[in-house]
Image (cartoon, rainbow, N blue to C red):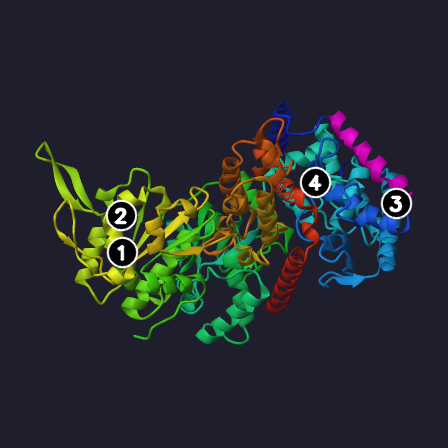
Amino acid sequence: MSNLPRLRPEKLQLFQDRYRQLLADGKILSKHELDRQYNLFRKSFGPEALQEFDGEELLNFMHNHGNHEGLVYWLEFKNDEDFQTTNFGGIGGGSALKFRVFRRKETGTWQTAPKRGNAPVETSVEDAVAIARSHRDQLIRGVEVIEDFTREPSDDNYAQLQVQLDEVAPDVSRLGWGHKYFSLLCPDKIDDIHSEKWQRYHMLKLLQEPPQTEGRYACAGRFVAAAEELGIPLNHFTGLLNSVHGGLHGYWRIGTTSGKKGESFWEMMQDQGRIAVGWNDAGDLSWVDGRSETRNKLKDYLTDLGQTSSTTVGRDATQLVYFVHKMSEGDIVLAAEGMTILGVGRVLGPYEYFAGEEFPHRREVEWLDTKHWKLPIPKEGLQSTVRPLGKFNENLLAIEQLIQTGGANETRPVSRATTRKIRLDGISGRIQSVLERKGQVILYGPPGTGKTYWAERAAADLAAISTFGRLFNDLQESERTQILGKDHQPGYVRLCCFHPAYGYEDFIEGYRPSADGGQVSFVLRDGVFKQLCSDAIASPQQNFYLIVDEINRGDIPRIFGELLTILEKDKRGKRIILPVSQEVFRVPKNLFLIGTMNTADRSISLMDAALRRRFGFIELMPDSTVLKDSSVSGVALKGWLDAINERIRNHVGRDARNLQIGHSYLMHDGHAVKDIRTLKRAIRDDIIPLLEEYCYEDYSTLENILGKSIVDVSAARIRHELFADGQEDDLVDGLLSPFAELSTTTEAISTDEAREAEEASEELDEDDES
């Protein structure tokens, strides 16, 4: 071990303290249990077991995801009292393409993808068997090489092992599942971190420059040596790394000056606690994601704006995709001016758009250090505004040393800045149609299906069309204020929410207590709806919209009172006398109501019949198609949501259709969630509590929906430890384990293909820049 760096003293102490804590909390397997599971896997799938099979039987034993006693199922999903695969490093997520041969769920045919980036093609059983035989033989030869490896753990020795494995097992040693197989058979020599990116990430966090040799086995000597230094099993050491270092994050260089004017925006970024980039006329780019078609659309958009030349449009589009989509909470950013680093920060929030301001595309950050310095290789990313760092380990190591060892921080206190008739389409178009026909509409459906979102969006667009002849997003800021209002100045779109204590006096009129000179008296006041009617009558050329959120949570007949008589479209303008004030009252034709109703709380059939006749109804159910081609850490969002809802319908019982999970829980700012941290929060804080409510703390039913990796039935609890930083791989495995065949679906495969195409296009752009 003489040529390997030892753990730094502060790291050594930290690991020792954390190890004692993990042991006390039962967060890691005992040595006895580790050995038991290693021995079980060897007995089930070691070289001797693999040699017992051949032909189609071998193919199904190794590569059929539907076979729960098969190799690929054990490697990716098996989590029960016999064997917990999540304790040995995750390879979950993505599609079955990662195994290079698989049986497609929809057709039952065998598919293969010979080369990275190639679409899977159907293959004969005979050819699939030949691949399985090759995989089996390579696994056996690889195990022999590793078991014969007896040299001390050094970079040179493991570099030679890397070469040997690539020679004898080229088709499996370079894949994550092959690495996991070898680590399970030789757990004292091969670590169970199955991603080279993760291995090198942990090296940098240990403040060690990764080995020069590339490959999944090159870093293993470092991990083996560190485990020996601590005197603990290698499996326990990698668990410590995940616990201490948390989730994987990226490193970025962000330019701080305007390319055209040379004006510096660093002071604004430092004061407001944000990073920002220009492209001022591009507008809100929240719609940008990583799909190639979106990227092409962005290229065309930038070209039409004249914001970029034809020679740089690809580079500019890539940089904006980086900033809006690729960058994630927890990433480290370097604010730079030329070769000088002005500040190092950690990203705290998602992309934001500040209309009307210079450098309007922004993200909130926490500045960790604001000394001026230079990277060891200062030219990395120099010609770009937004650039991922990682080409040079020396630079990443320097960043980590600065963050971990600290130094004088000169950060300032951070502040937190915060006509032609147009026909709408989609759900907004349906709302527009019902309002024109009936004057009021209720959007109903399970939670998370976007009812309030669509109500607000449609109301804002319809009011904008009525007032300015344009859609809401096309308005200036002052025009938007007229639509939505500001402070004590009400707009044309207003919102209220019904609840059990909400009454007629809140909605129409009633006496309310008022203190004057120490005396309490009761004053007759107009309610929300009466005031809106008055404003609408005073401005007959302008349409007004009232959104009543959670309309079914109130006592509707009591709240509406005599209003039901004049609410119908053909009775608008008819006068009645209000019983309290004795005033004449009417509902004008230019006022429209949009209600939302959560059917998980109350079925539409329980609503007052008279009210149902006066409203139009639009059902909004979970729409997983909006998540198509979206994947977070290998979890194909559409397929996962569909699978969860299918289990809800099968296990929750009566009215389960109205108790499904809506797609909006997996969305942020109108787009699918883009990073694992946001996904974790959505599942932990929104979806799981909702399912617990549906199941009335019946954890057996919860297990039937979420799977035993997430739900501990015996302890009647959710395994919340899976949502901690550093447990992302285990969480992904747990989310996917009930749906083993999900990775073989067309959707999962197309998501993988889209990601590979995106990465390939970015690599081409980077080559062009260099």
Picture disc at residue 166? none
Q: Position of residue 349 (x, y in %)?
A: 46, 49
The Cα–Cα distance between marks 2 and 4, rounded to whole angstroms, is: 59 Å
Lateral position of residue 358 relative to residue 637, left or right = left
Q: How packed is label 2: few (under 14 Cα within 10 Å), some, or many (20 or more)?
A: some
Q: Position of residue 287 (x, y in %)?
A: 48, 61
Q: Which residue is mark 2?
A: 560
The Cα–Cα distance between marks 2 and 1, rounded to whole angstroms, is: 9 Å
Residue beneath the point at 40% across and 44% down: 606
In primary-sequence order, the first of circles 1 and 3 is: 3
Q: Which residues are magenta?
A: 31-52
CB contact under 8 Å: marks 3 and 4: no
Q: Nearer the viewer, mark 3 or mark 2?
A: 2
Q: Position of residue 264 (x, y in %)?
A: 40, 60
Picture disc at residue 89? 4
- Along the line of sight, which residue is nearer the eye, 123 or 578? 578
Residue beneath the point at 51% across and 73% down: 300
Question: In the picture, which quadrant includes the C terminus?
Answer: bottom right
Q: How packed is label 3: few (under 14 Cα within 10 Å), some, or many (20 or more)?
A: some
Amino acid on which disc 3 is placed: Ile
In primary-sequence order, the first of circles 2 and 4 is: 4
In primary-sequence order, the first of circles 2 and 1 is: 2
Q: How packed is label 1: few (under 14 Cα within 10 Å), some, or many (20 or more)?
A: many
| Magenta-colored segment: predominant secondary structure | helix
Q: Is residue 509 above or below residue 629?
A: above
Q: Which residue is mark 3?
A: 140
In primary-sequence order, the first of circles 3 and 4 is: 4
Q: Is residue 529 visible?
A: yes
Amino acid on which disc 1 is placed: Leu
In primary-sequence order, the first of circles 4 and 1 is: 4
